[in-house]
Amino acid sequence: MTDLRALRSDFPILDREINGHPLIYLDSAATTQKPDSVLDAMDEYYRLYNANVHRGAHTLATEATELYEGSRSKVARFIGAEPDQLVFTRGTTTAINYIAYGWGLNHLKEGDKILVTIMEHHANLVPWQLISRYTGAELVYLELNDDLTVDTSTLDQVLTDDVAIVAFSGMSNVTGALGPIDVLAEAARSVGAISVLDGAQLVPHTPVDVADLGVDFLAFSAHKMLGPTGIGALWGKPERLEEMEPTEGGGEMINTVERNESTWAPVPHKFEAGTPPIAEAIGFGAAVDYLDAVGMDTIAAHEREITAYTLDRLSEIPDLTIYGPRDVTLRGSAVSFELGDVHPHDIATILDQDGIAVRAGHHCARPLMKYLKIPATARASFYLYNVPEEVDALVESLYKARKLFGLT
Amino acid sequence: MTDLRALRSDFPILDREINGHPLIYLDSAATTQKPDSVLDAMDEYYRLYNANVHRGAHTLATEATELYEGSRSKVARFIGAEPDQLVFTRGTTTAINYIAYGWGLNHLKEGDKILVTIMEHHANLVPWQLISRYTGAELVYLELNDDLTVDTSTLDQVLTDDVAIVAFSGMSNVTGALGPIDVLAEAARSVGAISVLDGAQLVPHTPVDVADLGVDFLAFSAHKMLGPTGIGALWGKPERLEEMEPTEGGGEMINTVERNESTWAPVPHKFEAGTPPIAEAIGFGAAVDYLDAVGMDTIAAHEREITAYTLDRLSEIPDLTIYGPRDVTLRGSAVSFELGDVHPHDIATILDQDGIAVRAGHHCARPLMKYLKIPATARASFYLYNVPEEVDALVESLYKARKLFGLT
Amino acid sequence: MTGLDELYREVILDHYRNPRRQGKLQGDPIHAEGSNPSCGDEFFLDLFVEDNVVTDAAMRGLGCSISQASGSMMMDMIVGKSVEELRELIQKFKVMMSISEGDSPIDEDRPGSVLGDLEALQGVRKFPVRIKCADLAWATLSEALDQTTS
Amino acid sequence: MTGLDELYREVILDHYRNPRRQGKLQGDPIHAEGSNPSCGDEFFLDLFVEDNVVTDAAMRGLGCSISQASGSMMMDMIVGKSVEELRELIQKFKVMMSISEGDSPIDEDRPGSVLGDLEALQGVRKFPVRIKCADLAWATLSEALDQTTS
Ligand SMILES: Cc1ncc(COP(=O)(O)O)c(C=O)c1O
Ligand SMILES: Cc1ncc(COP(=O)(O)O)c(C=O)c1O
């Protein structure tokens, strides 16, 4: 197994004890832990360079601006993009809302369709619902195959010329299923729609090059890839970013401001109104430095292995149902399951007593839950710092849950 | 003079040297420096408690949620509000945009008027311009008196029943002039308009109690009050927050999500889509703890004194023009000036050689600059950590600038 | 007993698996709904109240063992009680569930123990995040009772 | 000389205060506009080009001493030069302003010095944020020249 065990010492939180046990953190799909280098970069920024960026003629302002723009370059390069195609946002959610308002409010009209899949996170559904209210556009859905991958066989029925936006996830945060990126990007192109890829669970876990993706927009969050909270990114094809209006107005995003109208700064600044998350951008840059140093191929291989091991070990447990593909080439490392009639929240409580952090609930994917006809799942999700012994501990605790609930 | 000198050792950046001189940081209106306690709170969060908030059944998630919501309570209490009236946003800019979209897009109609003042920061102008495009509303302006305070004598002319929003700053970031909060809040009420107070420069510098302000909404930024970047707050009267729609859609802000429509979580969560700036909220909480410990009255008194001293000392300098009120009861501590024909950027460069950080430019207030018929000003701005010797150094450097430019 | 054994006592699992008074009431009962948006638990309650006394009750719930067991136990106790008695019961339940320094271990036979099966829920106090699960049914009942006085 | 003395040399302040060829050209000149949004400096340029040679030029600028002096010095040099010569001049200016290891101090009389007054701008190299000020006029000229070939 790709052994990244030595990296664990870079993550201070992994020394913590929870309920008398060493922390076993299996909730990286919610947010990841941070290495020292990311925390140090932000701390150093505040202790040595803190100033507002742009427009500053003094030394600190210049240094802060260089660090901020330097991070933009790093994050852009990480996905194979140019810096001026990369907008810093608060996270994936804000990035998708920016597209919904900035592109949708100005391009959608009554009767237009927004094609999504039933496995989307609320972040890739609710913005489209909001914008539908204002424009009269309408959501249409792709459903799932038996293995819970997206069923694209119904595309010809739903893919009409009215489809203006195709928005889909690169990887489900519930089932781990990879999205059919090529098929849907091509589908969007074929009807002149724009394609929006929710990369919140994709970019952290697999090498990504926007040149290969074929989509118009990509959104992702730093906190799910070793970076801080409060920042994420929106990448867009230059021509798409040009045709998009800014959602937020304020300082730094303008060219001129007159009493009744304004003109905008060039992309990406036109989308970054006000004081940006500066320290957070710098932490984001340090996070991609860390990921680059480990290597995204190595990380992806490690996750594939630990996912395969997890699927294997979980399958041993009686009454346990896994929701998601079994084929590790079709999925990432978020593994959702049910255990007999032990409610997911009870599972989470029982595991927590052994120091194991898993998530329980609808994972911000209620339409998917309804489709699967379940109210909730328990979810274990992994990242580069997880090791197989942690999976063993998970399995052992799940047997304990069986026993507590008298399952035999 | 209220001597807060001992606090300086809490701010690590003040040990820095710039161009061979100790840093003299006179750019707090752009962003403030951070005390150890704020940096430590965030660092500790990442090292011990980092997890995504809400919906978590494991220990870390519970602890993170308690810290996050605990900070909401602290920040709310700091302005005399209840926690459920306080929405965390990315900053002042985002807060005002949320009002513009969330309230404006749903309440404004063709012919409605948005009353602003000519001294507003772009953050309190451009969002209204954006929303005017979508709704057909129109901006109308109040101009200034000779001392650059807002001229309210023309109110009867502009205050018609069409006025739906009155948006104004509590303190200009250019001239330091305090806004006529009482008059404009009352004016808004008298025509059934909502009032929006841009508190970016007010809340950091003076005790604020929303019960006394009489406005409907208040926006402010953590980074201008010792807190981190990436976070700010929107306070609203409960009934206003209720009638406001969410701007961003996504996780955590929903009650139910169906395929084609959703319902919202209660205020304030309905305005906090997606993973919030968690570490930043915790840093924000630590910042208001610090300010509370010093005492906002003490801080306000200190700033009044250092402002008076600055105005006095600057007045000595030949060819120097101050833009803003001379009466320190009418103003805060942002002091804008021009020095003969030495361009503000040249001033900033010359001062920077002596380690003095001031800002030069239009300060995101182009309509004000145009009104004043100047392209830019230099601005020195102060906070609790500044001492009178720093003003002396500023004055000395300005004499050096005179000499370099051959002014006699 | 470990904390988990105290939490998942047999009586709780029994109520979870065999919830009492499951269903809907015909006619036009008082109806109240409660939910914990943070975990998705839901509780629907139907009541008939005549002369200030609960004459019939039914519930439908969705959620974890604690929320469902607490609801089921509650259903066991409410029919035949007056609105005032129920308000008192809600109060007693709240006191039992409140965390205070030096909590004594569960003692079903302590003098003054009036809550019967419900006493088994004391184990939840060691799991503060789960207290809101136990509270859900009772908050819903409280809301239903408010409708009787309006 | 200190860095500041090198930056604000007399010749620079002279150009700043008495900018050459200030104004607009009558008729239908080639027109280009440049601005540094980060500091608000602006530069407007009018040119007449006949037979590939600049026959007249005028500027209007707004901004700091460096941007305005650089522009004024440029105006002093461009009339009578061919488009190719100007492109070469822009290139030489760029080379002069580029920061490289071991920059020599300003030496107006160095062999090959062809930039005249402009050499005084070398002091800007010690203030990297201000280089864009010095560049503004030249970037605008470059844009104007591009219009001659289209
Ligand atoms: C008066 C005023 N309003 C609004 C803002 C915008 O604040 P932020 O950039 O933190 O969103 C600022 C800060 O630049 C300001 O000074
Ligand atoms: C697939 C997916 N999309 C979007 C999001 C939203 O990301 P954020 O909360 O960082 O905005 C998440 C994270 O919860 C996710 O897993």
Image: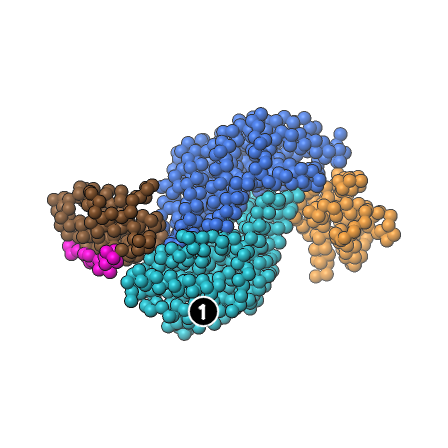
Chain colours: A blue, B cyan, C orange, D brown
Residue A13 visible from this viewpoint: yes
Q: How many marks?
A: 1
Q: Is residue C145 magenta?
A: no
Q: Is residue D15 magenta?
A: yes
Residue C51 is situated, as x and y percent measured from the top left of the image, at 79, 59
Q: Quadrant of residue B6?
A: bottom right
- Determine whether C13 is above or below B23 in the image: above
Quarter the N terminus of chain C occupies? top right
Asked which secondary structure carries label 1, the reply is helix
Residue A344 visible from this viewpoint: no
- Of residues D10 and A10, the one nearer the viewer is D10
Kind of residue sitting beneath label 1: Tyr
- Of residues C148 and B252, the one nearer the viewer is B252
Outermost residue toward the front in this view: D1
Give the residue displayed 77% in from the left and 48% down from the top.
Answer: C74
Quarter the C terminus of chain C occupies? bottom right
Give the residue displayed 47% in from the left and 52% down from the top.
Answer: B16
Graded by Cα atoms within 10 Å as few (under 14), some (14 to 19) or many (20 or more), the crowding at tag 1 reads some
Question: Which residue is tagged 1?
Answer: B309
Residue B306 is situated, as x and y percent measured from the top left of the image, at 47, 67
Q: Quadrant of residue A258?
A: bottom left
From which residue to which does the magenta span run? D10-27
Residue A371 is situated, as x and y percent measured from the top left of the image, at 58, 37
Q: Chain of mark 1?
A: B
Residue A372 is situated, as x and y percent measured from the top left of the image, at 60, 35
